[in-house]
Amino acid sequence: MSRAILHWISGPVLRAHREGDFALREAVAVGERGLLGEVVRIDGAEIVVQVYEDTTGLRPGTPIEGSGMPLAVELGPHLLGGMFDGLLRPLGGVHEAFVAAGGRAAPPQSFGFEPVAVAGAAVAPGALLGHLRCGQSMPQPVLCPPAVQGVLEWIAAAGPCSDVDPLCAVRDAAGVSHPIAARQRWPVRTPRPVRRRLPADAPLVTGQRILDSLFPVALGGKAAIPGGFGTGKTVLLEALARGCAADVIVYLGCGERGNEIAGVLEEFPQLADPRSGRSLMERTVIVANTSNMPVAAREASIYSAVTVAEWFRDQGLDVALMADSTSRWAEALREVSGRFGELPGEGGYPAYLSSRLADFYERAARVETLGGRTGSVTVIGAISPPSGDFSEPVTSHTKRYVRAFWALDVRRAQARFYPAVHPLQSYADNPRGFATWWAAQGNDAWWSLRRRFLSLLEEQARLERMARIIGKDALPARQQLALLCAELLNEGFLRQSAFSPIDRVAPPAKQGAMMRLLARFMDLAEDALAAGAAVTAIAALPCLRPLARMGEEIAHDQPQRFTELQTRIEAEFGSLRSAETGEAHAPAAAG
Ligand code: ADP
Ligand code: MG
């Protein structure tokens, strides 16, 4: 292996004279402690190394050993339910205000092995070799790694096993034997190969009405949640982790303060999985690099997290990756790049900020795996733009790569309107393809209802501007009614409490029922207005209150209550009409 001698140190960045060949992106071990680093530049006889651990105490003269391999992480059955640092080493422990940094590789774990493949069989990348079981949690497949193909020489019998010991070996065409363990290494910056990418024609159901019904993200798609401080990014990501229809959640806490991440780490294990009723952690992997941990590992952490997501995708699962926050990741990139002496670009970020963001988001996909399964990775990244300015570089570059943009609005958050997703600043690219999916869920009218709701919200913004000038009462009755309906849409549909047990996850069927009921109200209100009813009379209908609160009051397994509410709305409009008719006839009768 090659060696280099350290001569210059600046925080996580080292320069060293090389005594042999190094490859760009080669992993290295620094000094006696074997600090993990990566060659990020080769300058003639000098290499520049970025170190993923605390460099305090390092001195010039320290040797650096090359590994001959790119920076890689350990993937395996030990990941589910675990908490790891930016290089997937188990976290030392969670304390009130901080998360202790990770040490070395995860210790071996015991599982029960059940072989599926038999010795002598031909196996190709992605082939199912066997299953691992551990207690009650879901069995995990052991697959043939991407680069290995040949004949199965031997395979372990059913029984207890360790995830680090070989369970079988495959002899390739050249006669080389490849031992295969359940735990496998993969270079984080290289996307795991797939057979092909599949079209993204179904949404990832998030359980959040404003997202699913108005700005859906595809299964295997990518979304960003930009929002200033305190607008609800973390609460929304947690709500998505809890409620979205993914099989596995990878939660990346990246560069936020230790106490915020400690909150997530403490809360997640206590959350019940709405699907199984068991702990949500059983199908979650948490990767955390808090602001007190080495900055370079933060840069690597998003690739580690997406590599974990691809690992489970390759098992044929739908994986959702939540990253909080990509701005802190970009700041780490900026800090490390500054120490290399690279020329800063826009906002001080290196010129490759955009391509690095692309490298990350491009790994989101719905795919046919090497083993012929269908799996997906959906990436949802929070962005915390300084002073909430969406024109800053991280937000504007991210916009180029994501297909759904869920903009959190400071004013909505200040008014405690949650989730504070702004319906006019948010968008989803071309969601019309999901109409077929919605129709299969029993909501044939989804596309037209969505269009109707969005144009009502646009009209609301326009009318509110006008009302500020001329006064609300001076608006024509039709426009006053539009404002009333828009308010009902906001209160009764877009607003959704993350803390209400009934409301925090809204399944598609409930969303559809609510959309149809609101549309029914709007139709009846327009008819009533046309028939001469006063807006004030419509606004005084008692059914408005249960309509505005149906999200919190009607559980998803009570569809008959939506029917009852509809009957009630129709009855109230009916009596409104007879009252109007009564009034209209009264003077005539008196005369
Ligand atoms: P950010 O991560 O954007 O800085 P947080 O997610 O920590 O903001 O939210 C800040 C606070 O706003 C939370 O502590 C909570 O009180 C409130 N909040 C945010 N989202 C919601 C929600 N969906 N429902 C209720 N309260 C919320
Ligand atoms: Mg936050």
Image (spheres, rainbow, N blue to C red):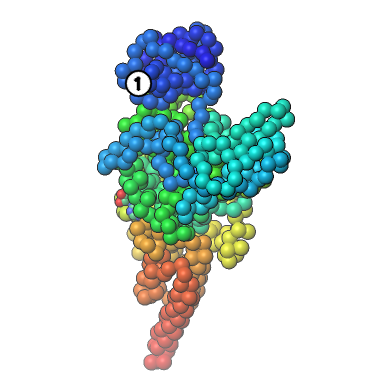
Residue 316, percent across and down?
59, 48
Q: How many marks?
A: 1
Q: Secondary structure at mark 1?
A: loop
**Quadrant of the image containing the C terminus:** bottom left
Residue lying at 37% horizontally and 33% vertically, measured from the top left:
102
Number of residues whose C-alpha sits closer than 10 Å to that of mark 1, classed few (under 14), some (14–19) or many (20 or more):
some
Residue 381, percent across and down?
46, 41
Q: 442 above or below 346?
A: below
- Name the residue that disc number 1 marks: 55
One can see residue 586 in this view:
yes
Residue lying at 38% horizontally and 71% vertically, measured from the top left:
546
Residue lying at 35% horizontally and 64% vertically, measured from the top left:
473
Residue lying at 46% horizontally and 30% vertically, measured from the top left:
300
Q: Relative to 73, is 142 on the left or the right? A: right
Using the image as rendered, state which of residue 301 and residue 224 is in the foreground: 301
Res 477 → quadrant: bottom left
Using the image as rendered, state which of residue 222 and residue 274 is in the foreground: 274
Res 150 → quadrant: top right
Residue 229, percent across and down?
33, 42
